[in-house]
Image (spheres, helix red, strand yellow):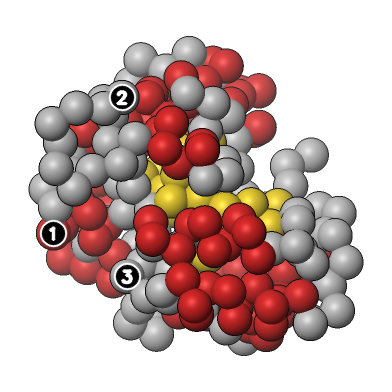
Amino acid sequence: MRKNLIAGNWKMNMGPRETEAFFEGLGEQGLSEPKKTDCLICPPFVSLMSATARKVATPWVNVGSQNVHFENNGAYTGEISTEMLKEVGCTYVILGHSERREYFGETDEIINTKTKKVLADGLIPVTCVGEVLDERKADKHFDVVETQVRGSFAGLSDDEMKKTVIAYEPVWAIGTGETASPEQAQEMHEHIRNVLKSMFSDDLANAVQVLYGGSMNPGNAADLLAKPDVDGGLVGGASLKPDSFAELIRISEQS
Ligand code: PEP
């Protein structure tokens, strides 16, 4: 039985002080440790230590980064390594978000290299895939996502793939207020599982958590999470406030 994962992607929002205030607020939401939901917050690099230090009231919230470099150290100005992330208490890393693909030139090949590096160093990758609007309009979305899945996870062992989280994020739904319908999400998640079946095995495809991302919020989460192949959400805007993040966790626990 797969657990859900409710993951907050804060993007370039929330400095250290706002992060401290968020975790204080989250501690006041009356949540107890979720039974069937893993929880994750991914702040900007400079706020990671505030997050790991201030999650005292909610120690079950994992902390992750939004990116990492694939080398251990060296002359890579502006980059961060897996060891540095582990030192500040990170356990997850978001990889290949559409904003990194679009603005920072990340390709499936780079994302594949990063996914392998993150797994080799004992962190959990949340690797993102998803089509842009023109690709959906041209009815190419299944092919586009299949290519991304095959490219991003090429050469992973079964053991590595089992530890990987996939986030399906239709780019047209990210930060737009427009959500994929639960049916659109379900058919793509099922498609992703079928691609995994052909790359790995049925058992493995059924074990991997596949999250939906794209304007998920407390108003639409229940219908999305009710779908059999939707195992949680990668959430931007609605993860920035303790009350809506807490509400998403409650909805997931009831799904
Ligand atoms: C995201 O940042 O991955 C995302 C899905 O953002 P939003 O929930 O704001 O659409």
Q: CA distance from mark 1 to mark 3?
A: 13 Å
Question: Relative to 28, is 132 on the left or the right?
Answer: left
Pair 2/1: label in front: 2
Q: Which residue is mark 2?
A: 72
Amino acid type at image mark 3? Met
Q: Earlier in the sequence, mark 2 or mark 1?
A: 2
Position of residue 47 relative to residue 200, above or below, is below
In three-dimensional space, the C-alpha distance between marks 2 and 1, rounded to whole angstroms, equals 24 Å
Mark 1 or mark 3: name the one nearer the start of the chain. Answer: 3
Q: Amino acid at mark 2?
A: Asn
Mark number, residue 103 = 1
Question: Which residue occupies 30% across, 41% down?
Answer: 80
Q: Where, by quadrant of the figure, is residue 143 drawn?
A: top left
Does the rendering let one see residue 184?
no
Q: CA distance from mark 3 to mark 2?
A: 24 Å
Q: Earlier in the sequence, mark 3 or mark 2?
A: 3
SS for dot 3: loop
- Tell me the residue at 38%/23% (across/down): 116
Q: Which mark is residue 12?
A: 3
Q: Are marks 3 and 2 in contact (CB under 8 Å)?
A: no
Report the mark closest to the observer, 3 or 2.
Answer: 2
Q: Residue at x 45, y 63 (%)?
A: 47
Where is residue 16 drawn, in percent x and y?
46, 71
For the N terminus, the image quarter is: top right
Q: Secondary structure at mark 2?
A: loop
| Count of labels in the image | 3
